[in-house]
Image: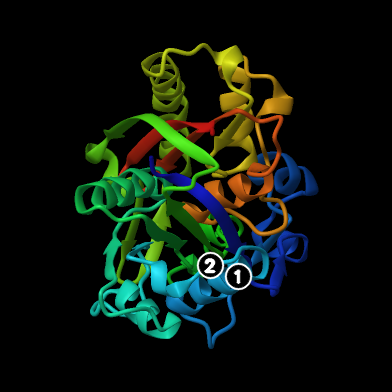
Amino acid sequence: MLGIEAIASYIPKKRISNYDRKKKFGITDEFIKDKIGVERIAIKDDSEDTSDLCVSAYENLKKKFDINENEIEIIVVITQNPDYTLPQTSAILHGKLGLNTSCAAFDVSLGCSGFVYGVSIIQSFMNANGFKKGLLFTADPYSKIIDPDDKNTSLLFGDAAAVTVISDNPVFVADKFTFATAGKSYKDLICEDKVLYMNGRGIFNFVVKQIPDDIDRVIEKNGLIKDDIDVFLIHQASRIIVSTLTRKMNLPEEKVMYDMHDYGNTVSTSIPILFEKIIHDNKIKLALASGFGVGLSYASTVFRRV
């Protein structure tokens, strides 16, 4: 049985305060706190690339988890902002970590749904090939593609990375998944000419219309009811989106994690950042994860404590 054994994240220390940009963008304290819910964004150093963020997450993992590099049989990197167009970032990361040549390495081009998709992908690959230990990395430094003068994106997105250990000695195992795509709306979040564009209203409408049904569907698919879930790990898109989903689905606020005010929307890394905070909380037996965004893509699953 494969599942999540450990998680570690890396958030760059550098911050940009949104309060310092109120005049530039014509926004208020209330807009910062209650709508986007991001007071400061984390931003990588100019010398750091996507693979470097992954290395830093791995170094943080080793500080609290005993891992043998020789046992790692696969690494998967979820990113849409790689070091280069080619080769794959996972190959660069493989070299930086000094892993065995017998280790598989590939990238997956997914955004905000990427962690949920990634868990299913890496576990399926490992099961098919008899692997026992792998690493799932998420890293999407949007600072590479954000226009600092774009109010819709520069106030919201932050840089970060995470690494999730998938092994046959799990703390949490994923049950059944749901996956979906609203591809006709792909232009609502798109990078053209190396600059990110986001239709905030379009993304909000998509989330409010599609995600409650998807969460209900994954709960039912796993033979559960909402009250069974101990914590909801909802993609940290913005304060208003997390709050609206909580209210629309009548979820207890204390069960819905929110933790992006000091670093921003970290795309595929937002859910593992939350997961890292609760993985050793034995009171939490069932955790529901829901990721949604670029594509437009969305996916959910329920994790059970072993």
Amino acid residing under circle 2: Ile
Q: Secondary structure at mark 1?
A: helix
Q: Number of callouts in the render? A: 2
> To which residue does mark 2 refer?
67
Residue 66 horizontal/vertical position (percent): 59, 66
Amino acid type for the residue under numbered disc 1:
Lys
On residue 225, the disc is: none
Residue at screen point 67% across, 42% down: 278
What is the residue that sits farthest to the bottom in this orientation?
Answer: 47
Viewer-side residue, 173 vs 27: 173
Circle nearer the viewer, 1 or 2 = 2
Mark 1 or mark 2: whose residue is earlier in sequence: 1
What residue appears at the point 41 percent right and 37 percent down from the top-left corner? 202
> Which residue is labeled 1 in the image?
62
* The one of 292 and 108 positioned closer to us in this rendering: 108
Horizontal arrangement in the rendering, residue 209 relative to residue 108 (left or right) = right
**Compared to 127, does 176 lie above or below?**
above
Please state if 262 lies on the left or on the right of 179 as rendered: right
Q: Nearer the viewer, residue 3 or 89?
A: 3
* Contact? badges 1 and 2 (CB < 8 Å): yes
Colour convention of the picture: rainbow
What residue appears at the point 44 percent right and 80 percent down from the top-left corner?
Answer: 97
Give the alpha-carbon distance from disc 1 to disc 2, as whole Å.
7 Å
The secondary element bearing badge 2 is classed as loop
